């Protein structure tokens, strides 16, 4: 299951639910390339802060990981995937075109990561978390203008 990482509460909740149910589900964290602090921290296995963020995914725009959340993520996540804003925009458009759901940037990030890894995930059972509610009118106009009719 692909889960966007903001401050970490959502992915920590998915880890806790999986563990409480005794499942072996692999969890993949998703960050924006323009807000990579959790990806950097996952790779370094310690808190790594960044000086700034630059992403359309407001829910992922974090400069410093929460230490307690990072500890849980390190013990319960298989990997962390970074996606570009273009990847996120394409996923948001796909949600609207294919399912008639409006996703904000963080909500589109998980699908963007799955699409990025589609070849590796082909034939496997996968899930994505569609979350968040931070899409503004200007961003939604941009998505709708690019969506195929």
Image (cartoon, helix red, strand yellow):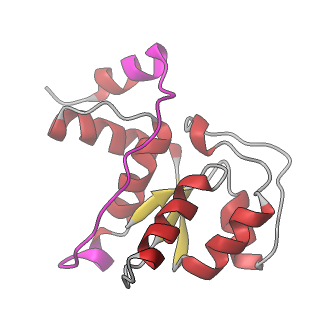
Going by the image, does 16 lie left or right of 144?
A: right
Going by the image, does 8 lie left or right of 122?
A: right
Does 52 appear above or below 46? above
Q: Position of residue 68 (x, y in %)?
A: 76, 65
Asked if the stretch drawn in magenta spans residue 136, the answer is yes
Residue lying at the far front in this picture: please name it: 20
Query: Can residue 38 be seen at all in this image of the molecule?
Result: yes
The quarter of the image holding the C terminus is top left
Q: Position of residue 59 (x, y in %)?
A: 58, 39
Q: Main secondary structure of the magenta part?
A: loop
In the picture, residue 125 is in which quadrant?
Answer: bottom left
In the picture, residue 26 is in which quadrant?
Answer: bottom left
Does 143 appear above or below 81? above
Q: Position of residue 145 (x, y in %)?
A: 30, 20
Given residues 17 and 93, the one toward you in this image is 17
Magenta region, residue range: 119-141
Residue plotted at (45% across, 49% down): 109
Residue plotted at (63% across, 56% down): 8
In the picture, residue 89 is in which quadrant?
Answer: top left
Asked if the stretch drawn in magenta spans residue 75, the answer is no
Residue plotted at (51% across, 69% down): 16
Q: Position of residue 134 (x, y in %)?
A: 51, 28
Q: How many marks?
A: 0
Residue plotted at (86% across, 47% down): 51
Query: Can residue 32 be seen at all in this image of the molecule?
Result: no
The quarter of the image holding the N terminus is bottom left
Going by the image, does 117 lie left or right of 4?
A: left
């Amino acid at each position: 299951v692909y889960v966007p990482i903001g401050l970490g509460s959502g992915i920590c909740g998915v880890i806790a639910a999986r563990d409480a149910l005794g499942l072996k589900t692999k969890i993949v964290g998703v960050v924006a390339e323009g807000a990579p602090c959790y990806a950097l921290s996952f790779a370094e296995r310690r808190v790594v802060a960044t000086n700034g963020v630059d992403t359309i995914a407001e829910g992922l725009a974090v400069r410093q990981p929460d230490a307690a959340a990072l500890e849980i993520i390190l013990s319960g996540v298989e990997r962390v995937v970074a996606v570009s804003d273009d990847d996120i925009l394409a996923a948001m458009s796909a949600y609207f075109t294919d399912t008639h759901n409006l996703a904000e940037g963080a909500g589109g990030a998980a699908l963007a990561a799955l699409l990025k890894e589609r070849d590796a995930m082909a034939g496997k059972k996968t899930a994505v978390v569609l979350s968040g509610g931070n899409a503004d009118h200007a961003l939604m106009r941009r998505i709708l203008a690019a969506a195929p009719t």
